[in-house]
Amino acid sequence: MPNYAMVIDLQLCTGCGGCIIGCKNENNLPEGVRWSNKITETLGRFPHVRYHYRPTLCNHCENAPCVRGCPTRALYKTKDGITAHDPDKCIGCRYCMVNCPYGAVNYTWNKPHQEWEDNTEIIPGCTYSPRGLVNAVDAKGWPIFNPDPDVNYKAIRPTGVIEKCHFCLHRVEAGDLPYCVEVCPSNARVFGDLDDPNSKVNELLGMFRAEQLRPELGTRPKVFYIREFCPCAYEPGKGMI
Amino acid sequence: MSKLWFGLLGLGVLVGLFTALTVMSKGLGVYNANDITFWVLPMAGYLFFALTAAGLTFLSSLPSVFGMKQYYPIAKRASLLAGATLLVGVMCKGLDLGPLSTLLNTINLALSPNFMSPIWWMAVLYGIYITVVIIKFYFIHKNKWHSIGGKTSGLLALLLMFMSYTALSIVFGTADARPAFFGHFTAVYFAVTALTSGMAVLVLASHFHFALTGGMPKEQKPIFDNVSKMFLGLLGAALFIFILRAVIGHTSLQEAFDGFRHIAGSGIYNIEMWLGLIIPFVMMIIPSVRNSRAGIILASSFVLVGMFFGRLVMLLSAQVKPVGNLAETRPEFVSYFPSMHEFGIILLALSLSLLIYSIGVKYLRLEATPE
Ligand code: SF4
Ligand code: SF4
């Protein structure tokens, strides 16, 4: 069985946020919810300032505290090492939100995409109302509804349960790449089998010193970061006050 | 008890029920909760009532399980109060899960259990505990204190109290991602504060009862003198634990404790400290206040208000500082103020528990002891 992991090459990542948008579209994410996200930092003191951009997502931790703490096994590990979620078992206790150190879990507080239920036409008789548009394109929930995740998750998760990244389990099981990997315009994301010594993931991990988020917690994250975008150079010297 | 009192409680229950039905139909979007502060006032209500119930269960076991027979006159009252607070506590937790569709998913606690999950143990143990507490009260009420059923249910209630309280402590204790829940120190904090709030409820309820029924029976005076001293001792212990927690929180180098340090400057923290601990402790030290009905009613009321805020303090300390990528585009600390629906749930819990107790006072002879 594969043990899926992801390597993100920060030298290739341009910080365009295409992964965030792609994920929202692919998984019908409601407003305010991001499975694919980012951590940005501005470091240094003017005029020596630098902006760091790090794309984030669920780390599909090998030792996932969210899975350990879930009372009904709504969060579970698939045979491929993906941390997946079953909304039909979820009791909404939000203990996974307590346990995830990365902020990778969202709770569905309100009916998803409810802003698309509005019947008001912006220009009466001329434009569609949000609901009118959804109906006109024969979609569910929102106009760009993607039914694909229904295969092994709920395409739109119901109110009152959590939702999270599942490495696009519906695509991976069909032999495709997670959508964030697919849409990344600079190929900064590499997805593959950690247990296959010849996988690209292992090739990169053998080549570069990889970084994981908060490894000291013992969660064994499976999203690795390599390299850094840094065109900077400085003149070396001894000490230099 | 006056019709007005029951009318007020009925109104509180009705308003609360309306809130509860709204939550069950619309979901938790009616709370001022979000992905940063997700365990808020209803969860604080759960902690407050469930831990108070633990303290009350312990106090009601003093004569029957620990052989301290002089405390029989408080046992039945404490037992009813334990049942009432436990019931509303569990109700608060239920109304903190989600709409009806989510509540129906709780069947998976039985169908798909995860024995590694402290939340699973907590849910199951509290479910059994509440049943046993009701059975225990039934035996006491039927004056079958010393029957096999009475003894067994008394012992089981105590045992289940310890087990469910332990599970609850582990829920917070094992949350490595959120050190500002204070890890396993929470177990000690919960134990002492649970006993203190349980004692405060018992003292308040008893003295109110005596005030309404024309005074404390003479033979109970020495018991309540002892109870007051125990209350003072517990308050001292709670204050000590509170100080210890503050020292840990303020001196820790871990960034995660920033949330605690932030909350420590807030009004709710000061309410917990001053109203819940320092003022009542000072009041109870003064013999004239300790021995006056008004003094003790006031002190115990202060403790309960403070302890309630303390539960919220504990929850928010570990939440106000956003974690991981949730910190993006958010301030260093988020703010929180409860919504009307959250207040409605607390109103329901409070009115319902008071209603159960008031019915008990009126019809169930709470001062009864074994014949
Ligand atoms: S990143 Fe969070 S949600 Fe994902 S597996 Fe790890 S603990 Fe669970
Ligand atoms: S909210 Fe759902 S997925 Fe998360 S721990 Fe509770 S039951 Fe499990």
Image (cartoon, helix red, strand yellow):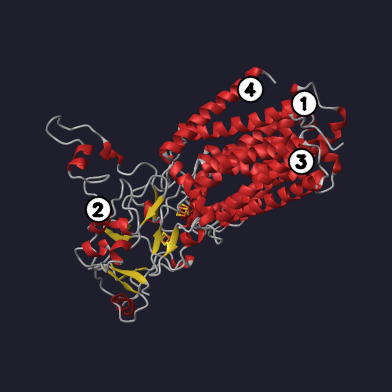
Residue A42, position in %: x, y?
31, 56
Q: Nearer the viewer, mark 2 or mark 1?
A: 2
Q: Which residue is mark 2?
A: A146
- Which residue shows up at 32% across the image and 50% down it? A156
- Which residue shows up at 73% across the image and 39% down it? B137
The answer to whether mark 3 and mark 4 are in CB contact below 8 A is no
* Disc on res. B139: 3
Q: Nearer the viewer, mark 3 or mark 2?
A: 3
Q: Nearer the viewer, mark 1 or mark 3?
A: 3
**A86 horizontally vs B241: left or right:** left
Which element is circle 2 on?
loop
- Crowd around label 3: few <14 · some 14–19 · many ≥20 (10 Å): some
Which element is circle 3 on?
helix
Type of amino acid at the residue the image marks with label 1: Phe
The answer to whether mark 2 and mark 1 are in CB contact below 8 A is no
Type of amino acid at the residue the image marks with label 2: Asn
Type of amino acid at the residue the image marks with label 4: Phe
Type of amino acid at the residue the image marks with label 3: Phe
- Which residue shows up at 17% across the image and 33% down it? A122
Q: Nearer the viewer, mark 4 or mark 2?
A: 2
Residue B15, position in %: x, y?
51, 27
Q: Which residue is mark 4?
A: B6
Whole-Å distance between the Cαs marked 1 and 4?
18 Å
Q: Which residue is mark 1?
A: B210
The answer to whether mark 3 and mark 2 are in CB contact below 8 A is no
Residue B228 in sight: no
Which element is circle 4 on?
helix
Q: Nearer the viewer, residue B309 or B279?
A: B309
- Which residue shows up at 60% across the image and 29% down it? B351
**B94 horizontally vs A33: left or right:** right
**Is the CB atom of the residue marked by disc 2 within 8 angstroms of ligand 1's nearest atom?**
no
